[in-house]
Amino acid sequence: MIHYDRRWNPISELCDVYGSDKGQVRLDDHPYDWPAHTYADYYAMLFNHCREHVENVFECGLGTNNPEVRSNMGIDGKPGASLRVWRDYFPRAEIVGADIDEGALFSEPRIQTFQVDQTDPASISGLWEKIAHLTFDLMIDDGLHEFHAGACLFEHSIHKLAPQGIYIIEDVKALDLKAYRSFFKDMPYTVDYINLHRPGMGVENNNLIVIRYNGISDGVKAINKAPPESANGLNS
Ligand SMILES: C[S@@+](CC[C@H](N)C(=O)[O-])C[C@H]1O[C@@H](n2cnc3c(N)ncnc32)[C@H](O)[C@@H]1O
């Protein structure tokens, strides 16, 4: 558990600049009217030391301001806010975004976006066909925030994660954590369930799942599986 202490970090500052609710330094004057998450605090811990080296970032969920679309950011929302945060924070990275709402799509230097429905395997595969040459150092699911949608996007996208990459599912509801635990149980990944505390924000509202390849090389596996010395007859 990480407790929120309002320490400055560059990602929170960029969230204030562009209007993403992943973090905040200012406490008011945001385009959304709820307290920001504190994901930026955790992301700064993960990436501050290597931000110059991140090459490709993917995020599902641009932040539409169309109130008819589920999981929207409200009518004052700024579509693309978090993609701009990533572009500025990772100075060498290309940023790819995707969203179900075509009205939220845009392109800017180092940012390209595509339409996708993360509940539809064919739609996700179609997205990856368009950018088959890319793998990602960071992949973030900030889309529909429901278990079935998160599981579907993960299953059909994890092959796009670079070998040392990190895949993060945001806004995981407390009830969905249990479903995700059984979903990941037999998969060959290291999966961390992160609950960030912020005063005034319920514990069900600030959860991340952070997934990595489990990083055990074949060499280490071979050492772990080697028979004990006694089994080789050395101690007999
Ligand atoms: C919370 S907003 C993303 C906020 C943005 N990442 C930010 O930090 O500024 C969630 C987005 O998910 C999109 N979304 C909802 N359902 C989706 C689906 N089935 N597939 C893909 N995107 C979806 C919504 O259109 C919305 O833009």
Image (spheres, grey):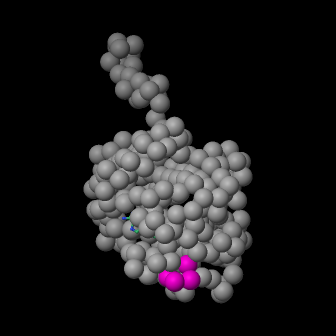
Total numbered labels: 0
Residue at point 71%, 65% (across, down)? 10
Extreme-front residue of the structure: 103
Looking at the rendered image, the quarter that the C terminus falls into is top left
Residue at point 37%, 59% (across, down)? 118
Q: Quadrant of ligand 1?
A: bottom left
Q: Up-down: is 141 above or below 12?
A: above
Q: Is residue 38 visible?
A: no
Residue at point 43%, 49% (across, down)? 127
Residue 189, how many percent across, how many down?
A: 40, 45
Which region of the structure is painted magenta?
A: 73-77
Q: Main secondary structure of the magenta part?
A: loop
Comparing 193 with 119, the one in front is 119
**Quarter of image, res 188:** top left
Q: Is residue 75 visible?
A: yes
Comparing 180 with 144, the one in front is 144
Comparing 229 with 11, the one in front is 11
Residue 201, how many percent across, how many down?
A: 49, 82
**Quarter of image, res 68:** bottom left
Q: Up-down: is 165 above or below 8?
A: above
Q: Up-down: is 201 above or below 91?
A: below
Comparing 202 with 87, the one in front is 87
Residue at point 70%, 73% (across, down)? 17
Q: Within the magenta stretch, is there residue 76?
A: yes
Q: Within the magenta stretch, is there residue 185?
A: no
Image-based side of 92 in relation to 190, left or right: right
Residue 2, how many percent across, how many down?
A: 55, 68
**Quarter of image, res 192:** bottom left
Residue 165, how many percent across, how many down?
A: 53, 45
